[in-house]
Amino acid sequence: MFRFLKKQKKPVLSYDPEKCKPAIRSSICTGEKVAGFKDKTTGAFTEIMLLQTDKDLEEFKARYGIEGEVEIFY
């Protein structure tokens, strides 16, 4: 028997603008884009959400209160 589950939203993680900056990691081969936060001291990237459309990017910015452009790295 199949059970239908509601799609659960991932919890909104808080980030410290002093320690992290918003960034988008883009694959050179496939073009896949992932939004997240890059640590300013270590350079470690924390993935938050997959970006499939421009609407996804706007949702990411609205969710975390980000204004302006987001850095893209490969």
Image: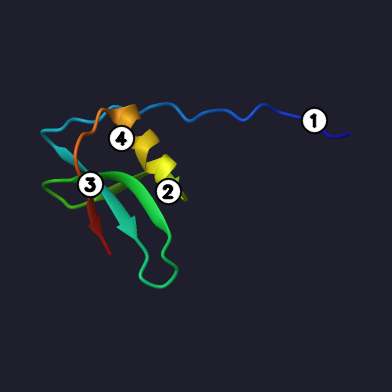
In the picture, the quarter occupied by the C terminus is bottom left
Above or below: residue 7 compared with residue 43: above
Name the residue carrying label 3.
70
* N-terminal label among 4 and 2: 2
Q: Residue furthest right?
A: 1
Element type where label 2 sits in the image: strand
Seen at 62% across and 30% down, the residue is: 7
What amino acid is at disc 4?
A: Lys
Q: CA distance from mark 1 to mark 2?
A: 28 Å
- Determine which quarter of the picture holds residue 55: top left
Tell me which amino acid carries mark 2: Leu
Q: Are marks 3 and 2 in contact (CB under 8 Å)?
A: no
Q: CA distance from mark 4 to mark 2?
A: 12 Å
Query: In what quadrant of the picture does the N terminus appear?
Result: top right
Q: Residue at x 71, y 28 (%)?
A: 5
Q: Which residue is mark 1?
A: 3
Q: Nearer the viewer, mark 1 or mark 2?
A: 2
| Image-based side of 13 in relation to 16, left or right | right
**Is disc 3 in contact with disc 4, using a CB cutoff of under 8 Å?**
yes
> Percent from the top left, x then y, of residue 6?
66, 26
Q: Which circle marks residue 61 in the picture?
A: 4
User: Which residue is depicted at the point 41% across and 65% down?
Assistant: 31
Name the N-terminal-most of marks 1 and 2. 1
CB contact under 8 Å: marks 4 and 2: no
Q: Earlier in the sequence, mark 1 or mark 4?
A: 1
Q: CA separation, marks 3 and 2? A: 13 Å
Work out whether residue 1 or residue 50 is closer to the camera in this orientation and state it: 50
The amino acid type found where label 3 is placed reads Val
Secondary structure, mark 3, is loop
Q: Mark 2 sits on what residue?
A: 51
Q: Earlier in the sequence, mark 3 or mark 1?
A: 1
- Residue 14 x %, y %: 29, 27
